[in-house]
Amino acid sequence: MSPRRCTAFAPGRVNVIGEHTDYNQGLALPFAITYGVTVRAAALGQADGKGEEDPQVEAVAVDLEERDSFPLGEPGPAEGWRAYVHGAVGELTAAGHELVAARLEISGRVPLGSGLSSSAALTVAVCLALLELPESGSRPDDRMELARLCSRVENDWAGARTGLLDQIASLFGAADAAILIDFQSLEVEQVPLLLDGWRFVIADSGERHVLASSGYNERRSECAAACAELGIESLREATTGDLARLPEPLEMRVRHVLEENARVLDAVAALRAREIGRLAELLNASHASLRDLYQVSTPAVEAAVEKLLRAGAAGARLIGGGFGGSVLGLIEPGLPIPAGALEVSPGPGAHILAR
């Protein structure tokens, strides 16, 4: 019998609006993009020199020309892209999933550190491939539980205290739609992305961000400190009346979250009314808040925003955790894509391409 094989794909994501709200049990409106990470996986048997007593995982990052191998039962700590592979094996095993020794070839079209959720796409694609290889094909029906598992990989193995936005967007994405996520109830609702000739583009600031070593974790800690100050479980329970009770910079952080949640609902209303110009205004307001209240922008990001606006974008804002990465722009109908920018469109969520 030939070894079992499969190819899994997981998309990156663009967050239309709703930044730094996921870990505060707020609202966000991302869409999965057509760019993502592909994992070609093959089960390793004794014929491959891997006996039952020492099953291995072998991983190759094709684009980086780097390799890794480790015992299936002892993934251990690692750094860089390896941390996500080790973490996927470790968390799937801890959750009781059957895994087999495997060779993984990883390639992708989501630039690392660009703010397009390359790490979540990598984790989701690796998990789907590993779950598909056993004879039982333990494909989980509960995608939300898989999103939680992938988030633990990011948090506990890679050291980035991200919320669930990236993983949910990758797993629940749909063609021609954004998804409204309520992180308090974990309800997911598709919102048709009918842009009437308007186009979303991404521009790279040229500054890589690494969530685990950037100010991202500091912002999470500040939000937790604000909750402790107010005696609440999450900022979803906060109100504008609470702001006067908070010292700086906590007041600014909470104000951003409250106003950003409102902007998400306004954006959904604008999309449903096909008032795309209004959506562009909301992107600009979101960026101003991220820059001035949440303070996650940088000079390189600001330059990228200004470049898009000068090139004809009606709205532009930083996306992702900030401190570098990419900028999202909304281009009016009939205008060309700015030089150096990349058009992004909604695509399907993570899936198995081939068995």
Image (cartoon, helix red, strand yellow):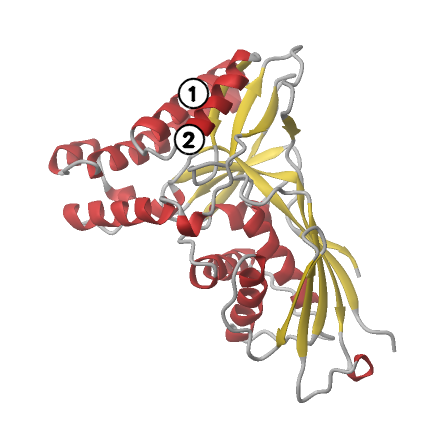
Q: Earlier in the sequence, mark 2 or mark 1?
A: 2
Q: Give the crowd class for mark 2: few <14, some 14-19, many >=20 residues within 10 Å.
A: many
Q: Can residue 275 be seen in this view?
A: no
Label of residue 260 in the image: none
Q: Which residue is at a point 52% across and 23% down the rendered structure image?
A: 271
Considering the numbered disc 2 on the image, is that residue within a helix, a strand or a loop? Answer: helix
Q: Residue 217 in the image: state x and y as whole percent.
A: 35, 49
Residue tagged 1: 284
- The answer to the question of whether label 2 and label 1 lie on touching residues, with beta carbons closer than 8 A, is no
Q: Check disc 1 and report its element: helix, strand or loop.
A: helix
Question: In x, y percent, where is residue 33?
Answer: 63, 38
Q: In which quarter of the image is the C terminus?
A: bottom right
Give the vertical position of 24 relative to 336 (above or below): below
Q: Which residue is drawn at 55% across and 20% down?
A: 330
- In this view of the protein, which residue sits in the foreground, 308 or 252? 308
Q: Which amino acid does label 1 sit on?
A: Asn
Residue nearer the viewer, 300 or 203:
300
The answer to which quarter of the image holds residue 311 is top right
Tell me if residue 41 comes above or below residue 216 in the rendering. below
Inspect the image, locate mark 2, and give the three-letter code of the amino acid beneath it.
Val
Labels in figure, total: 2
Q: Image quadrant for the N terminus?
A: bottom right
Q: Residue 275 or 33: which is nearer the viewer? A: 33
Say whether residue 274 is left or right of residue 354: left
**Mark 1 neighbour class, 10 Å CA radius: few under 14, some 14 to 19, many 20 or more:** some
The residue positioned 61% from the left and 54% from the top of the image is 122
Give the x, y percent position of residue 219: 31, 44
Residue 322 point in image, percent of width and height:
43, 37
In the image, 28: left or right of 41? Answer: left
Look at the picture and state if 111 lies above or below 243.
below
Dot 2 corresponds to which residue? 264
